[in-house]
Image (tube, rainbow, N blue to C red):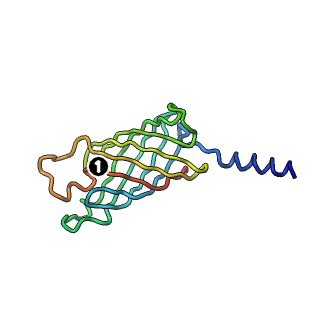
Amino acid sequence: MKKLILLLTILSVSLVHSQAFKGSMDNKLQIGANIQDGATGINLSYDYGLGENISVGVSSAYALSINDAIDADFGDRFDIKGRFNAHLGSVLDIDDNFDLYPGLSLSLKNFGGHVGARYFFSEGFGVFTEAVFPIAKYDANDLKPADYIHNQFVVNLGAVFSL
């Protein structure tokens, strides 16, 4: 009986061990909510590891619920961006399951930055949150109300999967 308990303990510990960012050729898919002033929607992002602490990817968001005072068409509701991340989880040596990643992005709406964190509960599943902010807005002097969608401080949160 002791051997069976020891075997089950070893198996459960080995299955629970995960790593938030593995480095080169790591693939992460994030799906979650996009929350901002005047709109909420869905966010989808994919990151590909280029090196031990660097990844590139693409992120897209679509605003589903918009304040009634804002007249927004599909182009106003949708944003897509290319992104670059610097993964600091292994540098900070906090926990293998945790990753902190600041980054930069270039989108249809602006040039911006983000700071995100991921925590993995298993090898393939975890949670994430990101704070996204514009650094330079396109046509900053001539913004109509719909132009503020995806062009302001945004919070993304949801599930992350290792592919």
In the rendered image, the residue lying farthest to the left is 142
Secondary element at image label 1: loop
Classify 10 Å Cα crowding around label 1: few (below 14), some (14-19), many (20 and above): some
Determine whether, in the image, residue 1 is placed left or right of residue 73.
Answer: right
Q: Give the vertical position of 112 relative to 79 (above or below).
A: above
In the rendered image, the residue lying farthest to the front is 2
Question: Residue at left 33%, top 60%?
Answer: 62
Q: Amino acid at mark 1?
A: Phe
Q: Give the vertical position of 92 relative to 98 (above or below).
A: above
Question: Residue at left 86%, top 49%?
Answer: 2
Q: Position of residue 23 (x, y in %)?
A: 53, 37
Q: Quadrant of residue 63?
A: bottom left
Q: Position of residue 42 (x, y in %)?
A: 38, 60
Number of dots carrying numbers: 1
Determine whether, in the image, residue 12 is placed left or right of residue 94.
Answer: right
Q: Position of residue 71 (x, y in %)?
A: 19, 65
In the rendered image, the residue lying farthest to the right is 1
Q: Position of residue 160 (x, y in %)?
A: 50, 52
Determine whether, in the image, residue 89 is placed left or right of residue 11.
Answer: left
In the rendered image, the residue lying farthest to the bottom is 68
Q: Which residue is mark 1?
A: 153
Determine whether, in the image, residue 39 is placed left or right of residue 129.
Answer: left
Question: Residue at left 50%, top 52%?
Answer: 127
